[in-house]
Image (cartoon, grey):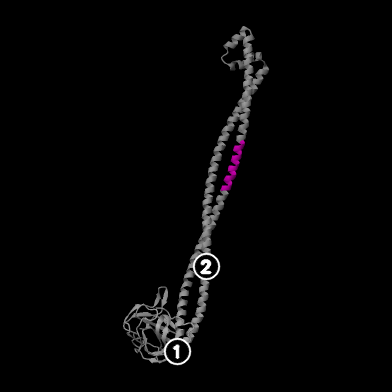
Amino acid sequence: MRRFLALAGLALVVAAPAAADDIGQKGSVDARIAALQARIDASRGQEGVLSSQLSEVATELQDAQAAVETAQASVDSLEAELASARAQLDRLSELLAVQTARLRRLQVEYARAVGVLEARVRTAYMDEPPDMLSFLVSASSFDDLVDNVDFLDRIGRQDQRVAADVDRVRRNAAAERAATIRTRRMQAAAVSVIGAHADAARAARDRLAADRDRLVTVESIKQSALADTRETRAEYVGEVESLAAESAALAARIRAAQAGAGSTGTGQPSAAGFVWPCEGVVVSGFGVRWGRMHEGIDIACAYGAPVHAAAAGTVIYAGWMQGYGNLVVLDHGNGISTAYAHASAILVSVGQSVGQGEEVSLVGATGHATGPHLHFEVRVNGVAVDPLSYL
């Protein structure tokens, strides 16, 4: 059932109604304190969870950053190696171009030298005596002619030296070019392998960097949530402290009003306990309901059924109070009071003494009620307690 609501700005002339107003305000304040305390506890728990998660994220972020740095170092090393390999490949390509041009020139020179030698052979064939013709005819190849010292003597040592030098240089150039081609192919393969490794290293670094950036975002979100949680909790704590002071002040006013009301009740339950205030069954108990504190019990009773005083006492409030509708509050002494809400009619007045079981009101559905029932509360020094402990 709804807690007592504060009657802001209500000016009551007599002390007893003012005390009842204080009872309503204190109930509302205490319910607010309980709700705020629950939120503080939840906020504290959430802060612990967020702090733990932040610690885990910070550790993961540190590891992720270290992994990114290691991956970046690997990428830097591979890129340096790749740059060196590409530079060497470029130098080999330039060397190969030079060697190719040189070989082509030497091939031309060699062809020219061979042409000179062939001309010499033709001249010898035409001008030399028969014995030379026989030797030329009997030669199996041109190399035999070149290798034959007698023949070389006849064509001239100068032509032989030129042809031999050109041929030697040409062969060396061809060998160097072939070696450069092989080296260049191997270097190109190395560049390809190093490039593939560098690409893989960059991709791995980018994945690690993406994970790190994700963790940075998560850390930022959780830090913001933690800051909000702490700020909200601080606001709750501040409000609780303010409300606690207000509740204490209201409790003092209630006790003073009860003391001045001249209660005739003993404040102690009879041998059988408090009598049931009306005939019916409990349909809603004491405790949290729908996210709010239900500070009494609801007893299903027929509309217009009589409501009895649970114990002897003095009427300290009899009138309308917002969500309670028509309300009667009895003081039983020793700080114990009872409340009877949603009445269709009030049968007592403030200051009246009533005996246990005496009718104080009739069941109704006034105030915040969806149907006829009695909302019954027991309070000790203004603080709501479970009525079933007294019935």
**Type of secondary structure dominating the magenta stretch:** helix
Task: Indicate whether residue 71 is drawn in magenta.
Answer: no
User: Residue 101: x, y in percent?
Assistant: 62, 29
**Residue situated in front as seen by the camera: 43 or 269:** 43
Q: Quadrant of residue 364?
A: bottom left
User: Residue 348: x, y in percent?
Assistant: 38, 90
- Say what amino acid the circle numbered 2 marks: Asp
Marked residue nearer the N-terminal end (2 or 1)? 1
Which residue is label 2 attached to? Answer: 228
Query: Please, is residue 282 above or below residue 42 in the view?
Result: below
Which residue is label 1 attached to? Answer: 16
The residue range painted magenta reads 75-91
Query: Please, is residue 187 above or below residue 43 in the view?
Result: above
Position of 350 with respect to 126 (left or right) is left
Task: Indicate whether residue 81 is drawn in magenta.
Answer: yes
Q: Quadrant of residue 286?
A: bottom left
Q: Residue at x 64, y 17 (%)?
A: 116
